[in-house]
Amino acid sequence: MAEIMPHWLTKQADLAPDKTAIELNDGTLYTFRDLKEASQSFARKLKQLGVKQGSNIGLLSANHVDMVIAIHAVSYIGAVSVLLNTRLTRSELNFQLTDAGVSLVIGQHGFGPVDTDFCAFSDVWNLPESPATLQTEIDLDDPFTIIYTSGTTGFPKGVIHTYGNHWWSAAGSMLNLGLKKTDKWLAALPLFHVSGLSILLRSVIYGIPVYLLEVYEKEAVHKAIMERGVTIASVVTVMLKDLVGCLGEKRYPETFRCMLLGGGPAPKALLEEAKLRHIPVFQSYGLTETASQIVTLSPADALQKLGSSGKPLFPAQLKIEQQEDGIGEIFVKGPMVTNGYYNNAEANEKSFSNGWLATGDLGFTDAEGFLYVADRRKDLIISGGENIYPTEIESILSAMDGIDEAGVVGKDDEKWGQIPVAFVAVNDPSITRESIWEFSAQHLAGYKLPKEIHFMDKLPRNASNKLVRSKLLNDKHE
Amino acid sequence: MAEIMPHWLTKQADLAPDKTAIELNDGTLYTFRDLKEASQSFARKLKQLGVKQGSNIGLLSANHVDMVIAIHAVSYIGAVSVLLNTRLTRSELNFQLTDAGVSLVIGQHGFGPVDTDFCAFSDVWNLPESPATLQTEIDLDDPFTIIYTSGTTGFPKGVIHTYGNHWWSAAGSMLNLGLKKTDKWLAALPLFHVSGLSILLRSVIYGIPVYLLEVYEKEAVHKAIMERGVTIASVVTVMLKDLVGCLGEKRYPETFRCMLLGGGPAPKALLEEAKLRHIPVFQSYGLTETASQIVTLSPADALQKLGSSGKPLFPAQLKIEQQEDGIGEIFVKGPMVTNGYYNNAEANEKSFSNGWLATGDLGFTDAEGFLYVADRRKDLIISGGENIYPTEIESILSAMDGIDEAGVVGKDDEKWGQIPVAFVAVNDPSITRESIWEFSAQHLAGYKLPKEIHFMDKLPRNASNKLVRSKLLNDKHE
């Protein structure tokens, strides 16, 4: 049966009108009442642009309170936000807009242009309010957002998130991490990715503030944790590495209780360093399709199971389709998992079976059911019949003194099929290919040793600061 | 869309196998793994008795770990537990068993007899296990339990609780109270009432222990809070009064964070006394139909809004159908509210409209949306055209030194239609009708003064220790 309930923001504004919903880095605060009123006003203005229940509306913005307001405003109309990555090219944006049937894009002034009508947030604010009625209730089965994700092959696919997907994701996280009424969740990840978006929804469901950073700066994140009462922060590996550097010999306040680490496998050495510095890192695993984390370490297991992503959140399920060496493709199921891609029967057919989503990621579970993620299946290197997991080599290289970051990909090879090729950014000019080989040979079997090593100033990363392995071979310049 | 998920107990046993699920007063502990294994074993034995998916199974037991196991076992078969009040007469039990189409009752040895097949828990344990497969998943739309409730008129009605009703109830409570992994919830209320049952389900969903008392004894509850790490306790008014007495000049440990008070309006004087003694009382309002509390004070508001039951839990809704004096009937809506009574179209027609449940209770909300519950509508006294709320008079009488408890009902009267009649239990022999009238006259308008005052040793209470006003006029003996 479809579950009907009050609009979440309205409900939270009823429960805790004076509580902070959004805190900006400059100290500006928005209460849940403020946020509701601004969002409803924005919705009435959007109505003047012809936005209707069921419309797909493009949203093109960096992190900004107007983006938060716009997301809630679109939902007050019963329309669906198509969240656009601000780093995309015009043609990439146009593909998504056409695919999702978007006829209007709203966003921060200066973004675009796109081939679709664009209206800046500031121009929306200048419109008069329509007297239209807004949605007072939501149906968990209704779509809330669409976010495009690049598949292993072909064009990006639009992941539809229902209100229910977001609800169950928030509930699962709460059951894992617990909930304190004094919690404050830091959002330094882009809101157009589900990792950032999900923080906004937890805020509205839990009744806790989001500490919203408009751009990621490591010092700002460090200060927010040290001085601004942040209790939980969502980060990816490179951010954790930055933060370890900022922390130095200091310690985070006792009230900081969770560094939620996503965005792919993390080097073991970094996790050990974080543990030494008493940083409460909880590794997690998730995809756009799972509305953010779906497997996360629990507070009880975080220290004992270093390197694991934990167990599937309540009430998600996980299975591994075993391959010969124990590693296999990760499948997940649960009410936080999308029901499918927008208007893409072929991808849906390929990815879903009996409610199980084939993630395209590889991993294994230990005897107690803890997940260890190896790699994207497409990144697996098969060399002379042996499976080589780039993450394993990256983890070793990253642990070497003087190496800042490392990426490994497979390169076609006549003799072996593929060979592993490494890319490193170093902070010590004395490091040579030979010294790296020497170090690696102490830890890796011969067939896993990178056959080429390339030096780069910086490895290619996406808007979430995740390593983009597919760009390594093209981006290299020495 | 129906939400499918792993069986909750199986899921929790996967997440936290070694964590305590049940703690008994004698120190016996059951982990989630123990509880799952015992419940699955019991389920395989029950199968030998012909229990099938979809069967309604009677459960007749006082609080006991076997009852917890039986409830989970029945759900592992996909059957439905009809929870029976152990205080009922044989004919009352037979009515419910016939109404719910129950062909087998299981329970503690010595309960019964009933006109239906009865099998004691101990006899079930002695059966061999059937090799039958058990449910691995649940559907939130499926029924889990049926609990009979007495309506304002006519025969008891069977309230069907789906898994979803219980889930949303647990989620709403968690969003209000927060969740700590160190929480331990005391169950001293009967498990055959939804107030007790809901504690079991929160345990399995949250992954926290239930401290299960087999019988209510005030010293045992006091000790559990003082010495056994209980952090949350569900109580009714008379228990709170007992506990205030036990506490004396001592204070509860800081870790005890919530005394969840249900079971009807509480005397203001008692709430004030509890506040003075730093007892974290959170008043709440709920019915069997709402799968326990649906309106509860929040930690932030508990001290400021003494006497209020709070705001509707996320994501429930509340409305009052106003009458002339601002007080009206309370209506509630939300996914924790039952979809209806078992096999009772007439009652369903009468109680539900567009998803709203008419509670039969009277109350009002203040300007900020906080609910104040006045009385059951059936208990309203109309005297000479004036509305008189028994709770108001009871609250005044209870505040008088020497009065232990007070109950007020309307009695038919030729001149006034009805008159208020009071029943009191006193601990001071010097108290007279005259002294009570004198005290009351300082606080109550003349038409509200009880026209008769009767002394009783003890007021009639049900299994949940709630005052049963309907029995006052019959039970009186002086």
Image: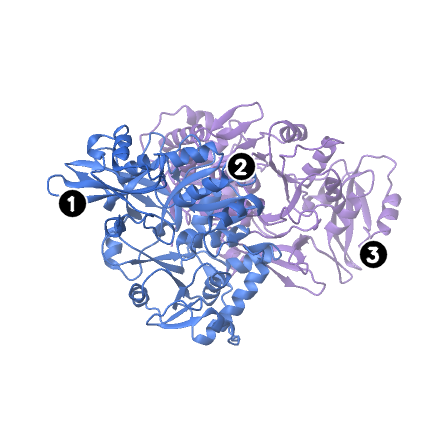
Chain colours: A purple, B blue
* Position of residue A26 measured from the top left corner of the image (x, y, whole percent): 57, 23
Task: Give the letter of the chain under mark 2.
Answer: B
User: Is the C-beta separation of discs 3 and 2 under 8 Å?
Assistant: no
Q: Dot 2 corresponds to which residue?
A: B250
Q: CA distance from mark 3 to mark 2?
A: 66 Å
Task: Give B28 or B248, whichever is nearer the viewer.
Answer: B248
Q: Amino acid at mark 1?
A: Asp
Q: CA distance from mark 3 to mark 1?
A: 93 Å
Q: Is residue A234 left or right of residue A140?
A: right
Q: Amino acid at mark 3?
A: Ala
Q: Nearer the viewer, mark 3 or mark 1?
A: 1
Q: Quadrant of the N terminus of chain A?
A: bottom left
Q: Secondary structure at mark 1?
A: strand
Q: Dot 3 corresponds to which residue?
A: A445
Q: Is residue A441 left or right of residue A346?
A: right
Q: Dot 1 corresponds to which residue?
A: B412
How many numbered circles does the render carry?
3
Q: Residues within 10 Å of mark 1 (few under 14, many from 20)?
A: few
Asked which quadrant contains residue B97, the reply is bottom left
Q: Residues within 10 Å of mark 2 (few under 14, many from 20)?
A: few
Task: Give B382 or A318, whichever is nearer the viewer.
Answer: B382
Is residue A160 among the parts visible in the rendering? no
Q: Secondary structure at mark 3?
A: loop
Q: Amino acid at mark 2?
A: Lys
Is residue A125 among the parts visible in the rendering? yes
